Image: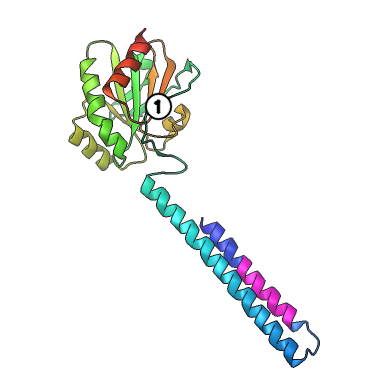
């Protein structure tokens, strides 16, 4: 965005320079010609400056809107839940540490149904579904179902406060550099992925989930 503004500023300077050069190149113009040339030059300079300011303010407004929406590096907040199309394929391997420093790898979870939920503490839909996800997790304890929360685009202290606030008891992984999110094709948050017991990524849900939706997704993975 800053590069674009700089380019526009250079363009406005170029227009001014062109007008001045054009004015200087006139050979002994008459007084009326000089007045007309000066007026034309001022109009061009003023127009270029107004155009530059308009584009700059528009760009700044876009940045502010994207920040308010919670977007980051092309990602955004998913406010409406829906099932996304996904071609069944082996789930990408990952190895991340939990908030407690315990490493967890996907290969260690072979034989269990895995639910992976990507979230951030500042995301309103993530907050809305947090207690629902925790309740469904508690209802599935002892059924060979593993829940993993993956925190990204966040500060660790904020992630810890989120876990405490919503009473999250399943493991929370820290995807500090966003690599796992990229490998799983995350487009925003929250997003949930369902992995079968034999390691196949079978389901992808974009946005918040209700209890019935999450329970149904687990049943599909275990069918």
Mark 1 is surrounded, within 10 Å at the Cα level, by few (under 14), some (14 to 19) or many (20 or more) other residues, namely: some
Query: Between 94 and 220, which is closer to the camera in this rendering?
Result: 220
Query: Between 59 and 47, which is closer to the camera in this rendering?
Result: 47
Residue indicated by mark 1:
82
Q: Quadrant of the C terminus?
A: top left
The part of the image, by quadrant, that contains residue 30 is bottom right
Q: Check the image and name the residue furthest to the top.
A: 223
Looking at the image, can residue 63 be seen? yes
The part of the image, by quadrant, that contains residue 69 is top left
Residue at left 51%, top 62%? 56
**Residue 208: percent from left, percent from top:** 33, 30
In the image: residue 213, left or right of residue 59: left
Does the magenta portion include 81?
A: no
Q: Which colour scheme is used?
A: rainbow
Relative vertical location of residue 55 with respect to residue 91 in this rendering, above or below: below
The secondary structure type at the circle numbered 1 is: strand
The magenta span reads: 11-23
Q: Check the image and name the residue furthest to the bottom.
A: 31
**Residue 48: percent from left, percent from top:** 60, 70
Q: Main secondary structure of the magenta part?
A: helix
Residue at left 52%, top 64%? 54
**Residue 1: percent from left, percent from top:** 51, 55
The part of the image, by quadrant, that contains residue 124 is top left
In the image: residue 167, left or right of residue 80: left
Count of picture labels: 1
Query: Between 40 and 14, which is closer to the camera in this rendering?
Result: 40
């Amino acid at each position: 965005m800053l590069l674009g503004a700089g380019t526009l500023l250079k363009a406005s300077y170029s227009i001014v320079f062109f007008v001045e050069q054009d004015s200087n190149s006139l050979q002994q113009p008459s007084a009326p010609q000089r007045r007309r040339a000066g007026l034309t030059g001022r109009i061009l300079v003023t127009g270029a400056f107004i155009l530059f300011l308009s584009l700059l303010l528009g760009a700044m407004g876009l940045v502010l809107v994207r920040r308010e929406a919670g977007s980051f590096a092309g990602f955004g907040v998913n406010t409406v839940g829906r099932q996304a199309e996904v071609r069944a394929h082996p789930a990408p391997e990952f190895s991340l540490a939990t908030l407690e420093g315990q490493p967890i790898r996907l290969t260690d979870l072979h034989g269990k149904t895995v639910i992976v939920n990507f979230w951030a503490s500042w995301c309103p839909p993530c907050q809305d579904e947090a207690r629902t996800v925790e309740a469904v997790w508690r209802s599935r304890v002892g059924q060979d179902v593993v829940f993993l929360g993956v925190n990204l685009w966040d500060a660790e202290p904020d992630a810890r406060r989120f876990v405490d606030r919503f009473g999250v008891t399943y493991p929370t992984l820290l995807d500090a550099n966003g690599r796992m999110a990229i490998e799983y094709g995350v487009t925003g948050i929250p997003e949930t992925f369902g992995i079968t017991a034999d390691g196949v990524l079978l389901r992808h849900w974009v946005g918040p989930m209700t209890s019935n939706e999450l329970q149904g997704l687990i049943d599909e993975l275990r069918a």
